[in-house]
Amino acid sequence: MTASPGPEISSEPALSWVAQGYATRVPVIYRVGMDHHQALGEYLRARREQIQPEDVGLIGGGRRRVPGLRREELAMLAGISADYYLRLEQGRHQTPSPQVLDALAAVLYLDADSTAYLHSLATVSTAKSRSPLRRTERVPAGTLQFLDALPMPAFIHDRRLTVLAANAFASALSPNYRPGVNLLRAIFLDDDERELHRDWARATVEAVAGVRAAAGSRFDDDQLTGLIGELSMRSEPFRRLWARHDVHRRTGGVSLLEHPDVGALELRHEKLTIAGTDGQTLVAYHAESGSPSAQALELLSSIAASRTRERVAEATNLDP
């Protein structure tokens, strides 16, 4: 099976949404945002609202007008003044020390990925603005050869979850595993992709948290801003998940799929970062040896090979 690198994927702005002004009408909490001065405060507020007083040993204190901890409660637990924390959340103070950030992360129960993200937001607030990214994504030639040689469904995506290359086995697993398709858009807006994932809710949580982690503090990515704006306008589930500000860098897991040709699949997916690239990731699916899912993958491999032969025959005007 030959891996398809597809056309070069440019990081030009998504004009179909940005140029029409849709992204600018989305509430800032739902967007990746271009105002780095507010990013730290937005993240702190989103995480604060997810911590209940009982989670940190405080008495609930009766009815609350807003969810989660109050600002003064978080400040007290982190050992800083309420006024100082208010200025952080409002974007009026941009240079908290690493010690303050670690104290806030501890109170908010942030894991390692989320804590690193918090630090990155504080770091970018002092950096000079950069020009929007204009970059063409290219998969290294050796990596394409490796992808082609893999005996399992595999594809490569960038940090926005846009597919850059895929082998025929992957395209047989999902038609969205082909160059140019954005998987974040597909999982929220493509009904067939939703039906493929028996664990759709888990898959969406992982996708959104992964994109936010990969985006980090890069506020100069017009294409990503356009994508977030589009999905915020068109998908309520996406809006809810993006507003949570979850950050996770998954290296693998289990996917539960329902394939139209081979039925139920329980597959592990492994994610490998490609060195020397701007966040490119190779994703490969495999099944436990001897399992029903392994047998189903063998059948899918045969189907993929047959379809490849048919396409080659059509392209050369030969009979299959």
Image: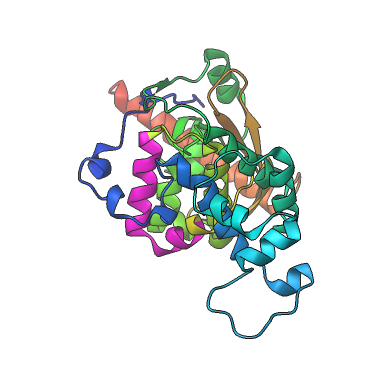
302 drawn magenta = no
Left/right placement of residue 225 relative to residue 251 reads left
Quarter of the image with the C terminus is top left
Q: Is residue 37 above or below residue 54?
A: above
Image point (55%, 62%), residue name: 201
Q: Position of residue 41 (x, y in %)?
A: 53, 51
- Tell me, yes or no, if residue 260 can be seen here: yes
Q: Position of residue 318 (x, y in %)?
A: 31, 24
Image point (51%, 28%), residue name: 127
Name the image quarter holding residue 151. Answer: top right
Q: Residue furthest left?
A: 20
Q: Position of residue 275 (x, y in %)?
A: 62, 20
Which is more toward the observer, 149 or 43? Answer: 43
Q: Is residue 19 above or below residue 262?
A: above
Q: What kind of colouring is applied to the model shown?
A: rainbow
Which is more toward the observer, 272 or 12? Answer: 12
240 drawn magenta = yes
Image point (54%, 58%), residue name: 244
Residue extent of the magenta highlight: 222-241
**Total count of labels:** 0
Left/right placement of residue 102 relative to residue 311 reads right
Left/right placement of residue 133 relative to residue 252 reads left
| Secondary structure that dominates the magenta span | helix
Q: Is residue 133 above or below residue 86?
A: above
Q: Residue furthest bottom?
A: 62
Q: Position of residue 295 (x, y in %)?
A: 66, 47
